Amino acid sequence: MQLYDKPMIAYLHNDLAAFESEENDKHLIYFFEKGYVTVLGEFDSDKYAGGKACIIFNQDEVISVGKGMLRFVDDKS
């Protein structure tokens, strides 16, 4: 895992939401609106297309997404 020395700004192309299972009344776990997010770092992962994932932050939650879902504003990707 590589945490960036300075967080980067990227544009998230899609809304992202996750809900708990039916046993837990389907409560919302997190919701990221498409738009600008802070990217804290990246890591290798077989779960994501391209094999790279980024750790993103939207002022409320921290999750990981495939690097291909982001368009970096800073010139790092």
Image (tube, rainbow, N blue to C red):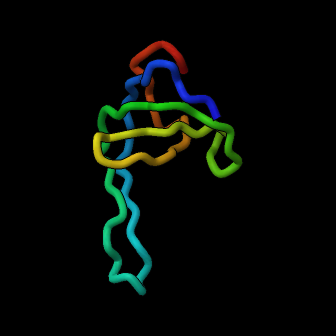
Question: Where the N terminus falls, by quadrant?
Answer: top right
Q: Left of 13 or right of it: where is 48?
A: right
Question: Where the C terminus falls, by quadrant?
Answer: top right
Q: Examine the image and state in which quarter residue 17 appears.
A: bottom left
Report the number of numbered marks: 0
Q: Left of 43 or right of it: where is 74?
A: left
Q: Residue at x 58, y 33 (%)?
A: 42
Place of residue 32 in the rendered image (x, y in percent of width and height, measured from the top left) = 33, 49
Place of residue 69 in the rendered image (x, y in percent of width and height, measured from the top left) = 48, 39
Indicate whether 72 appears above or below 48.
Answer: above
In the picture as drawn, the residue positioned furthest to the bottom comes out as: 23
Indicate whether 18 appears above or below 40.
Answer: below
Indicate whether 42 appears above or below 32.
Answer: above
Q: Residue at x 53, y 31 (%)?
A: 41
Place of residue 24 in the rendered image (x, y in percent of width and height, measured from the top left) = 38, 82
- Which residue is more in the foreground, 60 or 73? 60
Place of residue 53 in the rendered image (x, y in percent of width and height, measured from the top left) = 58, 40
Q: Examine the image and state in which quarter residue 71 appears.
A: top left
In the picture as drawn, the residue positioned furthest to the top comes out as: 75
Q: Residue at x 45, y 19 (%)?
A: 6
Q: Residue at x 35, y 77 (%)?
A: 26
Indicate whether 69 appears above or below 24.
Answer: above
- Which residue is more in the foreground, 68 or 6? 6
Q: Left of 61 or right of it: where is 21?
A: right
